[in-house]
Each structure stands twice: as structure tokens, then as C-alpha cells.
Image (tube, rainbow, N blue to C red):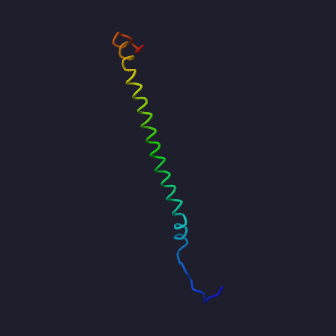
Amino acid sequence: MDRTLPVYLVAALSELVDASLATDRFVTAMLAVFAAAALLLAAVGIFGIFSADVVGRRREIGIPMALGSSDGR
């Protein structure tokens, strides 16, 4: 090596590794956020479907119970 050459970008190895992984970490964090949002939307959608089904069947379940059926049939 030539001792007369100037040295550029003097940094610790850990700083260089962190800088090189910053983009990957950001992409992973964004993917996790979007996955959590998708999971939340799916859960709300499933809840809505079951809720609408129960509301639609309220009369089917309530009439036999009002007439004395023990198991709702």
C-alpha cells in the first residue's frame, strides 16, 4: 500500500454495516406495517361477515327459543 494516498470515509465497521443494512431494515419495517394493516382489515372483514350472519339469523334462533326449545331448534 502507498502511505502517501489520502484515506477517505474513515468509520468503524459497525457503522458501515449499519449504513449498508439501513435500506433492508426500512423495507422490512414497511412490510411489517403493511402486513399488520392487512391482518387488521381481514379480521374486521371476518367479524363483519359473522355479525351480518348472526343479525340475519336472529329471528330464526329467537322464535324456537321463545316457543320453549331448549337448544334453539
Vertical order, 30 against 42 (above or below): below
The one of 1 and 62 positioned closer to us in this rendering:
62
Seen as rendered, the residue at the extreme bottom is 4
| Residue 57, position as x, y percentages in the image | 40, 20
Classify 40 as above or below 28. Answer: above
Percent of width and height locating residue 51: 39, 29
* Residue at the image point whose x is 53% and y is 78% from the top: 10
Q: Residue at x 52, y 76 (%)?
A: 11
Name the foreground residue: 14 vs 37.
37
Quadrant of the drawing holding the C terminus: top left
Q: Residue at x 51, y 55 (%)?
A: 28
Quarter of the image with the N terminus is bottom right
The mark tally for this picture is: 0
State the image quarter where residue 54 is shown: top left
In the image, taking residue 70 as reference, residue 31 lies left or right, namely right
Residue at point 42% right, 37% down?
Answer: 44
> Picture coordinates of residue 20 (x, y %)?
55, 66
